[in-house]
Image (tube, helix red, strand yellow):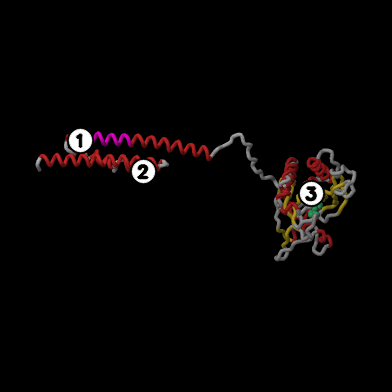
Amino acid sequence: MPEQDITQNQEELLEKLQQQLSEVRQTGLDLLRTLQDEEGLQQWRSNFLMRRAVITEIMRNLSNLPPEMRPVIGQAANKVKKELEARLKERFAEVKQAALTHSLNSERLDVTLPGRKPQHGGLHPETEVLREIYQIFAEMGFQVYRSRDVETDEYNFELLNIPAHHPARDMWDTFFTTKEGVVLRTHTSPGQIRVMREFAPDPIRVILPGMCYRYEQISARSEIQFHQVELLVVGRNITFGDLKGTLNDFVRRLFGREVRTRLRPNHFPFTEPSAEMDVECFICGGEGCPVCKRSGWLEILGCGMVHPTVLKNGGYDPEVYSGFAAGMGPERINMLRHKIEDIRYFWANDVRFLEQF
Ligand code: DAH
């Protein structure tokens, strides 16, 4: 090839490369101005400055150029590269600043605002009073015995000295199941027989809390389900004095030191003698009001000395052992305490009621 042509070709090549560099610079800068996030900038970097970029390509091929062209193109490419790098760095800083400003504006936190009150759950009033009763008896050395909700006729009645067809059964309106002889317990007393049969002839000091069921007309005063807490003490030489002392102590711990109590004779088939315990009406202080029906007294539990037949059914010799028992309704205690007028509130789960506790 004649020297003339070679020079001609070189000049064309030089021009072409310079043209390429100038185009890359211009498109690079134009594009860079439009990018708004880091991801775009990273992508831009890889397109314009990294391995497969035009500039990189040109620099990589320098050694193939005629020697006198190398410094010219090398310097020109380097200059463009430096400029693009510098602009990229600036854009990175700008984008970062913009993101920061944006997040400061959108997530503004006013530390002087008053806090939001967290919603607290609370204990059901029935849970509260039950726990209090457990606590008081625990301090007196009573254990908790859980008996079953579904009972047999035998345990719920017969072993408690309430034979079939006996008029005393009218005291308990019973839910019968479709299985002959199986009922929902109408009181916690059948648990007495179960504890005795489990522990005889050892002494017993337990409370038996649990849900009871009665087939009754639901009204402000009666529900078809309600709690009872049963008390049972069996041992040698247990007397009516023990019954009275224990129950008085319990009542004072629950209602307060000054509350007076009285025992009224009554009848239950499974105790002999039987009584009911009244506390002085703490609403009127004994003066007489609608809650105590003007009597000045509120009935809170039934009690008595365990009937010899019941002791025998539990596996204790009534000539050697004696015991006392009691049964109370915690809902009733709760109603008296908080002046709740309708027992149906307890299991209706109306938050407007529950929130008040
Ligand atoms: N079980 C009786 C009832 O549901 C309450 C009761 C009375 C329990 C006297 C007793 C007691 O242990 O001695 O009406």
Above or below, comparing residue 347 to residue 176 in the picture: above
Q: Quadrant of residue 79?
A: top left
Q: Is residue 344 left or right of residue 267?
A: left
Q: Is residue 151 left or right of residue 251?
A: left
Q: Depth check: 296 or 260 in front?
A: 296
Give the mark, 2 or 1, whose residue is nearer the N terminus. 2
Which residue is tagged 2?
43
Query: Which numbered mark, 1 or 3, is in the foreground of this view?
Result: 1
Residue 344, image x, y percentages: 76, 54
| Mark pair 2, 1: CA separation | 29 Å
Which residue is tagged 1?
70
> Disc 3 beta carbon < 8 A from ligand 1?
no
Q: Is residue 266 left or right of residue 330?
A: right
Give the mark, 2 or 3, whose residue is nearer the N terminus. 2
Above or below, comparing residue 134 to residue 154 in the picture: above
Q: Circle 3: is it few (<14), some (14-19), or many (20+) Cα within 10 Å? A: some
Q: Circle 2: is it few (<14), some (14-19), or many (20+) Cα within 10 Å? A: few
Query: Which numbered mark, 2 or 1, is in the foreground of this view?
Result: 1
Q: Secondary structure at mark 1?
A: helix
Label 2–label 3 contact, CB within 8 A: no
Above or below, comparing residue 170 to residue 59 in the picture: below
Which mark, residue 340?
3
Q: Is residue 158 shown to the viewer in this render?
A: no
- Residue type at tag 2: Gln
In magenta, the rendered stretch is 70-83
| Mark pair 1, 3: CA separation | 101 Å
Residue 172, image x, y percentages: 80, 59
